[in-house]
Image (cartoon, rainbow, N blue to C red):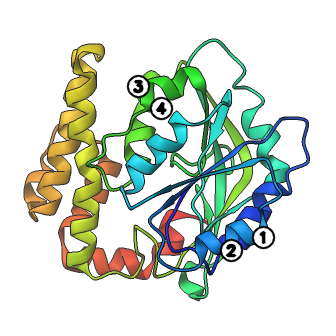
Amino acid sequence: MPIKNESKYIIECLLSILSYQGPNTLELILVDDGSTDDTAKIISSTFADDSRIKVIRTDGIGKAPAYNLAYKHSSGDVFCLLGGDDLLMPEVLDARIKDLATDVPSVNYCQLITFSNDKQFNEIRMPKSRHSGLESGGCMSFNKRFGDIAFPIPSVLPNEDTWLVLCGRYFSELTTQTCAIGLRYRIHDGNSRRRGASFSDFQEMNWSRSKAYFYFYDHFKTKLTTSQRVKILSTFWAALGSYLGLSSALIFSRNLTLKNKIKYIAHSNRIFFLIKEKFYRYLVGH
């Protein structure tokens, strides 16, 4: 768990993790990535006696490198990721990890529900289907065989989500679903992917995340089939086309599904983007 300036939320977050009472041994690797508020003081004064917590402090190396550092210093067999402003659902944790005690790279995806002071983004359950988990870093749990493939995350990436999801799609030999809410995801102004951002800000954020497709291709191309390489590069070029506003080129792309065409076109046009934002809760969840 990488954190930075989370003094407002950190106690509630840590209590949600440490309230786990299942049969498994819990280890929490906290990387305080250069906090300048009272985060470190709160952790040391409130949780000093809890031996399950290991705190690593840095001067500010970035989110992806902080995750890499946490993974390097972990001793567990199964892993979950969490942000310092979110809440773990401890009663679902055993269900998220029960299928991961295998000798092959394995991942599990649970569901999440949002909470926010903004009614537009409050109490949205994802994904829309109740029969699967959500492909995202916070909803993913995985075993060490998978972790040793996926880590380290390229330090140039702004977050872990896209990289880990791609690793899950192409290198997990066992993917299971926990059809229950395992994460309460807080939506607020401090999110790395800010809801309610302007169109130009959203494009910059989305493009910086989409670069993960190129780095993934470059790093793993010798382990991918030709069709897999084509698919990944097509998605990268679609993201670039979306960033450049090339809606017409996206419409006629042969290597994108209709769903992905709609998504990238919506991200390439200011009007389409505003429509998507207005109906966000109806489009992404239920």
Give the amino acid at mark 3: Tyr
Disc 1 target residue = 46
Front disc: 2 or 4 = 2
Checking the image for residue 170, the label placed there is 3
Separation of residues labelled 1 and 2 (CA atoms): 6 Å
First reached walking from the N terminus: tag 2 or tag 3 = 2
- Residue 87, horizontal then vertical, whole percent: 69, 64
**Residue 55 in the image: above or below residue 69:** below
Between 276 and 39, the one nearer to me in the picture? 39
Query: Taking 206 as reference, is 167 left or right?
Result: right
The image's mark for residue 42 is: 2
Residue at point 20%, 39% (across, down): 214
- The circle drawn on residue 168 is 4
Gap in angstroms between the C-alphas marked 2 and 4: 35 Å
Distance Cα–Cα, label 4 vs label 3: 6 Å
The answer to whether the residue labelled 1 contacts the one labelled 4, judged by CB atoms less than 8 Å apart, is no
Assess disc 1: are there few (<14), some (14-19) or many (≥20) residues with their C-alpha within 10 Å of its C-alpha. Answer: few
Marks 1/2 in contact by CB < 8 Å: the verdict is yes
Residue 58 in percent (x, y) is at 44, 57
- Which kind of residue does numbered mark 1 sit on? Thr
**Residue contact between numbered discs 4 and 3, judged by CB atoms under 8 Å:** yes
286 versus 154 height, above or below: below
SS label for mark 2: helix
Discs 2/3, front: 2
At 69% from the left and 67% from the top, the residue drawn is 43
Q: Amino acid at mark 4?
A: Gly
